[in-house]
Image: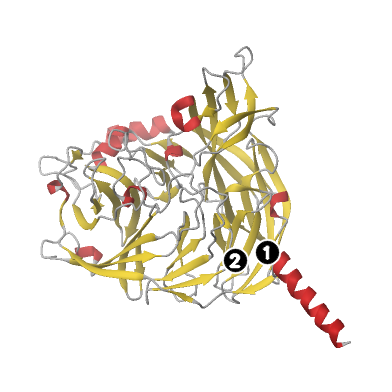
Amino acid sequence: MLIMRKTIQLLFAISWLIFGMHNTSLSSELVNTNSESKSFQPFDCKKLKTEYLRINNRNDCLIIQELSNEYEVKSHDIDPNTWNRSLLLRYIDNNDGEKIVAHTWNNVVKWGESSNKQPFSHLAIIDIPDLSKIFESDINQLNSKHYTLPLTARRLDTIDTDNDGDKEIVYLSNREDGRNRNSSWKDVNYIFDLNDSTLSKFGSSHFSHDLMYIDFNNDGYFEIIDYYYDPGGQIEICDLKTNKCSKSKKANQYVDIGFNHILPSNDGAIMFGGCPNLGDTTFCWAKVNYENNKINFKKLDNYELKPKPTDEAKFLIWTGDVNKQQGYWVKGSDKKEFKQADRAWMSATIDYNKDGFVDTIGIEKEVLCKRNDVSKPFNRSGGDCKEEVFLYVFKNINDEKFEKHQIIPTTINDTFRIEKADIDKDGTIDLYGFKQGYYNPWSVCDRQQLKSIYFNKKNEYFEHASSKFIKENFGLYGCERVSNFFEKNGQYYRLFITTPSAESEVAYLGIENYTGKKLASEKEVVNSNQLDALDALLD
């Protein structure tokens, strides 16, 4: 009897290890990090030594930090500084003071290499004594801490994880640091506490891809949704109040992994993404219900962008592998031209019309690939393919369906995320995107970064910002790599990370206000008759 009981216990333990635990607790295990304290004397952006400098005299601008981490393993010969791929740049106003945080990751292996080497990332935290006085001339130095974190993450955000009014950084484990996906190295998820500078683990070990969070039950605590690679894609949800994590293996039946967002609804939440098994050709929305640490899904709506693919072709991908991609052979091209069924890897949610229902922003790609030698796979990164990208705005109809509202040709595909801010200061929330994540040293300075701005016009539709507006409202300070807009007490700011040149071993973090202040030579003349006539025309 004793032997039988031991056998049953052993079998239970084995099954628990194989199939995974249904409920797990968030770990309180702290992870060691290395840090270095630095001080920096801010200087005017006009003094930045670069040939790529356009000063906007309406705005104040300061360089407030030097960032100079080198790659352990370069992905290109011209690739000296890790901060050309910064994935996080934020202003945070916590109870222990104002901060600016920036995160980037390092290459520790060659692209496409199979390796179990421990990766690491860089985190810079700059203390801001008083943001409202940052442009005053008596600020001699700013103090900061620079951390080396034992992780790599491309899915991260700043969230109040413990309902104390302060934001922490959430990192989802991710193996996209250039290594071959067949590598057995694994990692878990992390929370970095900005108040006490601790890094703690949570969740399970997997290849995370989509980070979402929402307070399902309105208890003041977020639930972290980690959509990760597993056959078909799976979800782990972690309740930050109960410190319990659970897995769902049904998400991939409703919404495919890749560019998902979750938005609140009147009776729970809605998840948006691509539709499963439809070759990146259809958007899907699914109702999400969360009760008793379990997450369930129900199909809500879908929108077909193009027909389901009927063909496939071989493509050389960034890891060095050759994979088959779905799409459509161009008739009469003798297998030299192929339209790939592809998608952009970002989306966003916004209540653009202020009707109380959260709307959806999605990105569609049209990808045409050409090759001369049909015996070789298409090389997309090698220039075989050209893209046309479109921004789709879908209106939420009473949380029951989503209606196509607007399609805009866009450059926002250069970015790694879509962000939101009132950029033109008219009281409506606008959309913007910046080149983030992927670094091209040969075009970083020649291509305008601050270009993907879309104004929300009267909460009715979006309109691309003109180059005139961008030039009149913002400067250009070197080869800018990432930007972030924010507002504090009615004042508007822009954070950015820049390098003086593509080959620079030093990067700089700057802050620019954009009040649109009048120059001394300008006079404000208001012609009420002209304004009345313009209003009548617009009406």
Q: Which mark is residue 375?
A: none
- Residue drawn at x 46%, y 33% is 381
Residue 429 is at least partly visible in this image: no
Name the residue type under label 2: Ser
- Residue of label 2: 204
Q: Residues within 10 Å of mark 2 (few under 14, many from 20)?
A: many
**Which of labels 2 and 1 is toward the front?**
2
Name the residue type under label 1: Lys
Secondary structure under the numbered disc 1 in the rendered image: strand
Residue extending farthest front:
3
Is 240 in front, or is 425?
A: 240
The CA distance from mark 2 to mark 1 is 10 Å
106 above or below 27?
above
CB contact under 8 Å: marks 2 and 1: yes
Quadrant (top left/top right/bottom left/bottom right) for the C terminus: top left
- Residue drawn at x 55%, y 68% is 222
Quadrant in the rendering for residue 138: bottom left
Quadrant in the rendering for residue 67: bottom left
Give how far across and how far down residue 85 sits, in percent. Answer: 37, 48
Quadrant in the rendering for residue 480: top left
Residue 342 is at least partly visible in this image: yes
286 above or below 446?
below
Give how far across and how far down residue 473 sits, in percent. Answer: 26, 42
Quadrant (top left/top right/bottom left/bottom right) for the N terminus: bottom right
- Residue drawn at x 49%, y 71% is 161
Give how far across and how far down residue 33 sits, in percent. Answer: 38, 71
Q: Which mark is residue 247?
A: 1
Secondary structure under the numbered disc 2 in the rendered image: loop
- Residue drawn at x 46%, y 54% is 154
Residue extending farthest top:
332
Position of 294 with respect to 422 (left or right) is right
